[in-house]
Amino acid sequence: MAVPKKRTSKAKKNARKANWKNQAKTEAQKALSLAKSVLTGKSNGFVYNTLEVADAIVE
């Protein structure tokens, strides 16, 4: 017979939500850091051809 599932506690729900938000915050910080390093030209982990980017902007 079908039995309803038990309700998730507030503590567990809040812990999962906090974990999800912290992961999103970390990824946002990484993206911002990468963008800053690309703009300053000091990036080592992200390689792209600036000539292709400039040509794409002009077109």
Image (tube, grey):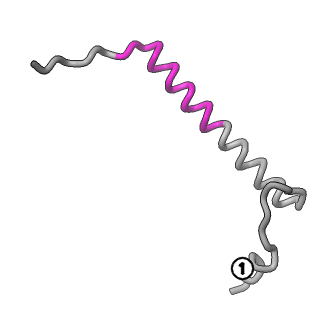
Relative placement, left or right, of 46 versus 20 is: right
Magenta residue check for 41: no
Quadrant for the C terminus, please: bottom right
Relative placement, left or right, of 3 versus 47 is: left
Majority SS type along the magenta span: helix
For the image shown, how many numbered marks are present on the structure? 1
Q: Going by the picture, which residue comes out furthest to the front?
A: 1
The picture quadrant where one finds residue 43 is bottom right
Q: Residue at x 77, y 52 (%)?
A: 34
Percent position (x, y) of residue 58?
Answer: 73, 84
Q: Nearer the viewer, residue 43 or 36?
A: 43
Quadrant for the N terminus, please: top left
Q: Nearer the viewer, residue 13 or 5?
A: 5
Query: Magenta stretch?
Result: 8-25
Rendered view: 56 above or below 45: below
Rendered view: 32 above or below 56: above
- Label 1: how many Cα within 10 Å (few below 14, some 14–19, many 20+): few
Rendered view: 47 above or below 54: above
Q: Residue at x 50, y 24 (%)?
A: 16
Percent position (x, y) of residue 9?
Answer: 39, 13
Magenta residue check for 18: yes
Q: Residue at x 76, y 55 (%)?
A: 35
Q: Residue at x 75, y 83 (%)?
A: 55
Secondary structure state at the residue bearing disc 1: helix
Q: Which residue is mark 1?
A: 57
Percent position (x, y) of residue 57?
Answer: 71, 79
Relative placement, left or right, of 15 versus 56 is: left
